[in-house]
Image (tube, grey):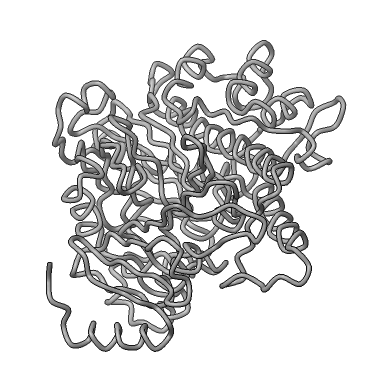
Amino acid sequence: MPVPDKKTLRLLRALARDGLDVHPVPGGWRARAADAPDAPAAEVLLPPDLRLEAKALAQLCALAACRHPDGGRVTHARATPDFHPGDGGVAIGSVLRTEGQVVPQAVGGDINCGMRLHVVDLTVDQFLGQRDALVDRLKGDFFFGTRDVAQRAATQRAQFVDGLPGWVAAQRPAPLGSVARSDWAQLAAELDRVHLGGRLAGDLAWAPVDLVPDDGVVRDAGLATVGGGNHFVEVLWVDEVADRRAAWRWGVRAGQLAFMVHSGSRHVGRSIGRAWAERARDAWPQGAQYPRGGLFPLADPALCHAYLAAEATAANYGFVNRLLLAELVRLRLRQVFGDDLEAPLVYDLPHNITLPDGEGLIARKGACPAEVDQPVVIPGSMGTPSFLMRGLGNAAMLCSASHGAGRAKPRFDLHRADAASLGLDGVDCVTLRAERRVEEAPAAYKPIGPVVEAQVAAGVVAPVARLRPLLTFKA
């Protein structure tokens, strides 16, 4: 176990003054709020060359101490190496296991933000030769509203309640919009490559009323949209294969083209997340002391059930949103490179979501499942590699891996940086807003290498392939 340097020792003393008991452990840190001795210790997987952030650690300790007066408890609190402060009071990279309670804020409003990875049997040279033709088409879809995602009311209802299987079953007999040109046998077969099959038990009562009419055609402005923040659509190439057996099983080969989609449930998730954060606060027992960090758990079984149904409804929408974004890319690739292009799905997995774990629940905020032999996609930045990994089912980390490199600098700081320090040389970013290139520059993120290596060393994931970016779309 490394001895903390002088700077870290000063940080530890400052944290102690703030009421946090923090100790280095092999591979990272363990912490607990001094006035919450019954709370589980929060553990952070963090390599020594990445900075421990005081605000993020305080947020994680508050999450670990989160307990409802009427019962329920946190059993485990973990953080992945992309750990950094969150705007909603919950650190990004937090993983929480509870029994007898659920914490809506532990997921927040970006419900089922996640990653979707496809591979494409094209070379880099083939792609670059038709780059402009593809970009022109996708710019229209992503920025100028040329996408056509019209759906019947029955399809809208099915996607909220039954996720991707419901959407496929309702849409497939007579599809509307762009997906009328899709390979529906392929879409149906790919459901097995989506985490949980792309379906949670949703409830139509939590869907936005204007999106679920009784009949007619719905033109949902939120579907097939990338979103802001760190969301993107990216074209990459497979630079290196480390595990040939897993790569072969998943259809991945060195030199292939690939594309990734990072988006979630958009306005639906924001609305549901905000409503339930307020509902949890309103349901707090009158006269009881407010919880640390303003994090309000739910313990009443009926409220817990209702929240999970609401979250599932938004999560189902997120699965469909990612599929439609990917399908726009796949259809445009076929227009440019030929109708026989398959571009199969490797995997689609969620980040921000609450899922059952035996008698308890695991809530992930900016972290993804990493079950045994499950594909795990860890993106870097638009100027650094991304990684396809194989989950190892590490119980100590609640079978969870990082959802990326993790933000290192606030957006405002980057606007004050000189251009040379942003790491944008050679970056091909397509956006209508020049500030997005700056705010999402490689310098905004932690180095992806140590983040991935720490998880490999800890037995969280094993490497399968490395992918390098060619082109990134930022809304």
Q: Position of residue 314 (x, y in %)?
A: 65, 41
Q: Is residue 383 left or right of residue 294?
A: left
Quadrant holding the N terminus: bottom left
Q: Is residue 396 left or right of residue 87?
A: left
Q: Position of residue 119 (x, y in %)?
A: 33, 30
Note whether 352 is above or below 54 in the view shown.
above
Name the foreground residue: 86 vs 325: 86
Q: Residue furthest right?
A: 214
Q: Position of residue 6 (x, y in %)?
A: 18, 88
What residue sits 80% from the left and 33% below the top? 212
Name the foreground residue: 311 vs 154: 311
Number of labels in the image equals 0
Residue 264 quadrant: top right
Name the foreground residue: 426 vs 225: 225
Name the foreground residue: 309 vs 163: 309
What residue sits 31% from the left and 37% below the top? 127
What residue sits 38% from the left and 36% below the top? 117
Q: Position of residue 305 (x, y in %)?
A: 68, 40
Note whether 78 is above or below 439 in the view shown.
above
Residue 55 quadrant: bottom left
What residue sits 31% from the left and 74% below the top? 22
